[in-house]
Amino acid sequence: MKADVCKEFFTHPQVIEAAKSDLLSDEEYDYMSMFFKMVSDPTRLKIINVLFDRELCVCDLMIVTEMSQSAISHQLSKLKQTRLVKSVKRGKNVFYSLNDDHVRQIFRQAQEHARE
Amino acid sequence: MKADVCKEFFTHPQVIEAAKSDLLSDEEYDYMSMFFKMVSDPTRLKIINVLFDRELCVCDLMIVTEMSQSAISHQLSKLKQTRLVKSVKRGKNVFYSLNDDHVRQIFRQAQEHARE
DNA sequence: ACTACATATGAACAACTGTTCATATGAGGT
DNA sequence: ACCTCATATGAACAGTTGTTCATATGTAGT
């Protein structure tokens, strides 16, 4: 921030104060940022999309999304760490499903947005 | 995708077909991805947050967010390119504001999610 | 025209992200 | 116990992203 920038510092002091009081905590921004990052990759969006109404195992996901086993597994791992999906082991398979409804809500809304 | 993976290819053929029919187009995933990317950076989230109920010029935003002029300007440029914000020039200042309500809705929802 | 200020922009760089490849783990059937 | 299949994981690498620094553009007042 250079010294010669914004000398008329208090051009809009009232709005600045109002805006400042709207600020959230860094933790809140970081959390939201993390959450949005998780849904900002096409592969993960695809995974979330096909898990919307059902559980699928890794093999199913490979076939449906046409991605490699490793790629899918890495992404599922991230989605699980951040609690967007949960998993259940049954026999040789591990079945994944969405962990809560927030993901669904936000996905739906973004989809609507995409269609305007 | 190795050949020796998922030999029991049709273990869950019905769900696979159902899941496939749920798939969106690549363009839709890309659009959603782009949109979420825009709101997945803490600096941009802060900007969106303080622009929620008012317009602010670049200087105001510098002060409120405590970021450098250049950093703010670069981020505003991205937000404008992707139509999340719009700008109006008045005198020496350029005032930025949110461009539509989708951003607000999704921001709010993520904020609620952050508070669970 | 000249100067001062507000904003924009390009290049450079470090940090992060997603994929692939190779390999490890772990469960089921034999 | 062994083998096979399903899934997980680590290392490496390319591509992307956000910041800083330096500088350019453009507007207003003189």
Image (spheres, coloured by chain):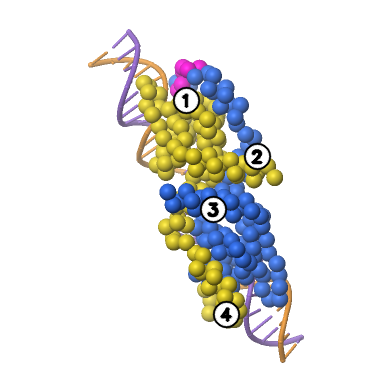
Chain colours: A yellow, B blue, C purple, D orange
In the rendered structure, the residue with mark 3 lies on which chain?
B
Residue B13's label in the rendered image is none
Q: Is residue A91 left or right of residue A24?
A: left
Residue A77, quarter of picture: top left
Residue A10's label in the rendered image is 4
Residue B108's label in the rendered image is 3
How far separated are the C-alphas under marks 2 and 1? 25 Å
Q: Is residue B67 visible?
A: no
Residue drawn at the location 70% of the way across and 67% of the way down: B88
- Disc 3 to disc 1: CB gap under 8 Å: no
Q: Is residue A102 left or right of residue B29?
A: left
SS type, badge 1: helix
Query: How far from the left and from the top, in percent, is residue A80?
Result: 41, 39
State which mark lies toward you, 3 or 1: 3
Q: Is B84 placed above or below A92 here?
A: below
Q: Main secondary structure of the magenta part?
A: loop
State which mark lies toward you, 2 or 4: 4
Instruction: Identify the magenta region.
Output: B5-11
Q: Is A19 placed above or below A6 here?
A: above
How far separated are the C-alphas under marks 2 and 4? 45 Å
Residue on which the image places disc 1: A59
SS type, badge 4: loop
Amino acid at dot 4 = Phe
How far separated are the C-alphas under marks 4 and 1? 60 Å
Query: How far from the left and from the top, in percent, is residue D11?
Result: 37, 42
User: How crowded is the residue under tag 2: few (<14 C-alpha within 10 Å), some, or many (20+)?
Assistant: few
Residue B27's label in the rendered image is 2
